[in-house]
Image (cartoon, rainbow, N blue to C red):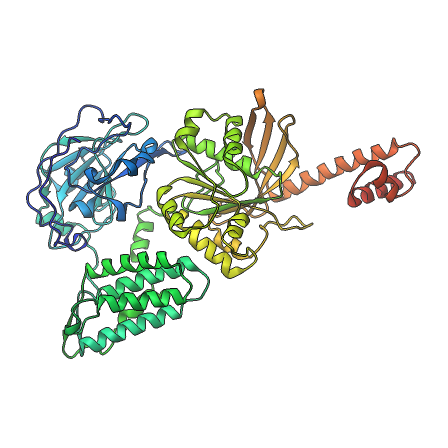
């Protein structure tokens, strides 16, 4: 570690209130060598002061050639000084760590980010004298101490579009010097000086966070004790109003309620809420609602701590009798869209795009941070498709997690080897798990461990069965999605659920079981249909049909890709994702294939001696099914008229 050791952080100064801008003077950062310093572990170290809050990141190259930085942890909760990261925490991420992010709020910083050298001086009229970092793309970061008197917010193009300058403040981060992209471009220290206080004129020119609404840190009330009691009861009433079944949503609401009541926790003899009473009431509600006990304690504890870190001051006078603002978390109030609209106006928001499992059409199949799915009959190639996609991701340096409820680690490894995966790639980036029971604490730990990974769960039905849940029950299906699938997606994972198909003669598009499976998928859902069966000796093809594409990049019924399976040497299997087809083209192809197959069947009947007499005769002599024999015999008779 080459960063300079700083003065210890003042524990009594809430980071969220003033970004810790009241700390003592910050020493300069240590300048890094010409290239990023790599430890013997194989990942770089951040070249920043020792007590700046950092977190590991990786880089992924996008189809347009640009590099995207991705946090490997939930950084808003998990950033901390580099020396606080343990070997155990980093060992499982080491293969993907390309660098480190700096949490601006927790480090007490505000940063001016220019993509083109000279944009900041051109905008402010001078070259700022403060800590200066160079980015991998040739831009610069001007690093200031966060002002104590105001809260600045993240914003883009703060000085217009002629000279593009963005602001990274509370809720934002920058890439630390010492980080290195896979293409060799490094992030460096350009000016080894302490972050300077931001000039008042510059502070005034930058966008600020909105002032606290009524019901914030200071509030006028008629009776403090009555107000707090009403807040507790009203909050619990609102929790009771939540619809049953969706555990993930109820946990989120429970956390919001704990934060809200935490603002009102204080000395009971002064009329504020007692922490023990609030905790007991919330736990009682959660257990009565059927939530997991261990999860409940963690959720309530986290929320109370967050709320108590920002206590409300209730001043008695001619004020409110009860907490009007206590129902803000219900979602029924009008949502302020101004920040979203500003992002749209700046061109920074767009609908999500699929990024995982590239096809020859140039449009991948699956969405990151979403729950995706493939359904199909047995032997339809679902698992092979997701393994091939996993190999694509591992070759980009991403972790591939297989939650396997149906097979074995030996099968998974042998299949990856058949697809051409090198042993070192499997050893370093393939994470196989074979759950034998649903322990919620273990599931929660797993969700944290695999954040940002490509995750395949095979299969939904088997996982629900193991949990004692019915895949035909809407409420229980919602609980399963809330406990496993959605938390994984919220952690930045690309989640792909494998499932079996509804038995249907009309080309059904949905997996078997509850319709909540459809609602739970917020990425893309596909159906695997065998066009031509394949094996390790025989080439074949599987059509991946679109059932649902939440991003709107493909139409329902279209073929996203025709996946070709071709045997290779020594038991290998070549998998290619060819161009797809529209629903109309696909229907025409199916009709042509069916006509060809029927013609072959009729020709086979023409060769029978003696000629076939009935459908039963055909079934007995050729061992065909009823539908095949009936159709072939009908066409055979018509051809002989």
Q: Is residue 163 visible?
A: no
Give left or right: position of 522 versus 349: right
Question: Which quadrant does the N terminus fall into?
Answer: top left
Q: Is residue 242 visible?
A: yes
Which residue, as the protein is rendered here, is positioned at the far top? 569
Image vertical order of residue 142 relative to residue 465, above or below: above
Image point (19%, 54%), residue name: 16
- Residue 474 in the image: state x and y as whole percent: 52, 60
Which residue, as the protein is rendered here, is positioned at the far left? 25
- Residue 576 in the image: state x and y as whole percent: 55, 30
- Residue 315 in the image: state x and y as whole percent: 14, 73
- Please name whichever residue, 26 or 289, is drawn nearer the observer in this view of the structure: 289
- Please name whichever residue, 388 or 110, is drawn nearer the observer in this view of the structure: 388
Give left or right: position of 636 versus 416: right
- Please name whichever residue, 565 or 196, is drawn nearer the observer in this view of the structure: 565
- Please name whichever residue, 396 or 451, is drawn nearer the observer in this view of the structure: 451
Query: In which quarter of the view is residue 133 placed?
Result: top left
């Amino acid at each position: 570690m080459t960063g300079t050791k700083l003065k210890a952080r003042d524990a009594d100064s809430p980071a969220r209130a003033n970004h810790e801008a009241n700390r003592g003077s910050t020493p300069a950062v240590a300048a890094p060598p010409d290239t990023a310093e790599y430890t013997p572990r194989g990942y770089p170290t951040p070249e920043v002061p020792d007590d700046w809050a950092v977190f590991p990141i990786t880089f992924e190259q996008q189809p347009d050639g640009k590099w995207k930085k991705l946090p490997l942890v939930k950084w808003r909760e998990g950033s901390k000084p580099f020396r606080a990261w343990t070997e155990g925490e980093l060992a499982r991420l080491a293969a993907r760590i390309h660098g480190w992010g700096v949490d601006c709020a927790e480090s007490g910083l505000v940063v001016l980010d220019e993509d083109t050298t000279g944009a900041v001086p051109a905008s402010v009229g001078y070259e700022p004298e403060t800590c200066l970092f160079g980015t991998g793309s040739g831009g610069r970061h001007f690093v200031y101490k966060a002002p104590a008197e105001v809260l600045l917010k993240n914003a883009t193009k703060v000085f217009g579009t002629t000279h593009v300058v963005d602001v990274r403040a509370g809720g934002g981060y920058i890439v630390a010097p010492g980080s290195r992209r896979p293409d060799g471009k490094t992030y460096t220290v350009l000016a080894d000086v302490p972050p300077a206080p931001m000039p008042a004129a510059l502070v005034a020119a930058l966008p600020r966070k909105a002032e606290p609404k009524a019901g914030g840190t200071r509030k006028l009330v008629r009776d403090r004790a009555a107000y707090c009691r009403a807040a507790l009861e009203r909050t619990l009433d609102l929790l009771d109003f939540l619809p049953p079944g969706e555990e993930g949503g109820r946990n989120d609401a429970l956390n919001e309620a704990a934060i809200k009541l935490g603002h009102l926790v204080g000395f009971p003899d002064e009329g504020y809420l007692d922490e023990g009473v609030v905790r007991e009431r919330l736990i009682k509600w959660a257990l009565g609602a059927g939530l997991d006990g261990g999860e409940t304690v963690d959720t309530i504890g986290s929320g109370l701590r967050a709320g108590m870190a920002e206590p409300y001051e209730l001043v008695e006078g001619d004020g409110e009798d009860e907490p009007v603002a206590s129902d803000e978390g219900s979602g029924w109030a009008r949502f302020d869209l101004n920040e979203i609209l500003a992002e749209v106006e700046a061109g920074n928001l767009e609908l999500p795009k699929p990024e995982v499992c590239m096809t020859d059409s140039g449009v991948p199949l699956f969405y990151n941070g979403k729950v995706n799915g493939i359904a199909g009959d047995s032997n339809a190639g679902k698992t092979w498709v997701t393994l091939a996609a996993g190999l694509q991701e591992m070759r980009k340096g991403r972790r591939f997690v297989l939650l396997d409820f149906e097979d074995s680690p030996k099968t998974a490894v042998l299949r990856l080897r058949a697809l051409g995966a090198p042993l070192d790639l499997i050893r370093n980036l393939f994470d196989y798990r074979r759950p034998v029971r649903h322990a919620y604490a273990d599931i929660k730990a797993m969700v944290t461990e695999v954040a940002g990974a490509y995750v395949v769960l095979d299969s939904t039905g088997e996982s629900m069965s193991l949990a004692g849940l019915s895949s035909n029950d809407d409420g229980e299906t919602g609980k399963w999605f809330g406990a496993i699938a959605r938390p994984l997606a919220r952690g930045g994972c690309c989640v792909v659920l494998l499932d079996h198909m509804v038995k249907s003669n009309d080309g059904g598009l949905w997996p078997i079981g509850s319709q909540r499976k459809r609602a739970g998928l917020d990425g893309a859902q596909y159906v695997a249909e065998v066009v031509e069966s394949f094996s390790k000796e025989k080439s074949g093809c599987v059509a991946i049909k679109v059932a649902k594409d939440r991003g709107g990049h493909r139409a329902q019924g279209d073929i996203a890709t025709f996946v070709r399976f071709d045997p290779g040497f020594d038991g290998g299997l070549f998998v290619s994702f060819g161009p797809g087809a529209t629903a109309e083209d696909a229907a025409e192809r199916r009709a042509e294939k069916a006509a060809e197959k029927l013609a072959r069947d009729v020709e086979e009947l023409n060769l029978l001696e003696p000629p076939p007499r009935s459908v039963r005769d055909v079934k007995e002599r050729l061992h065909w099914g009823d539908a095949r024999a009936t159709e072939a015999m009908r066409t055979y008779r018509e051809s002989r008229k």
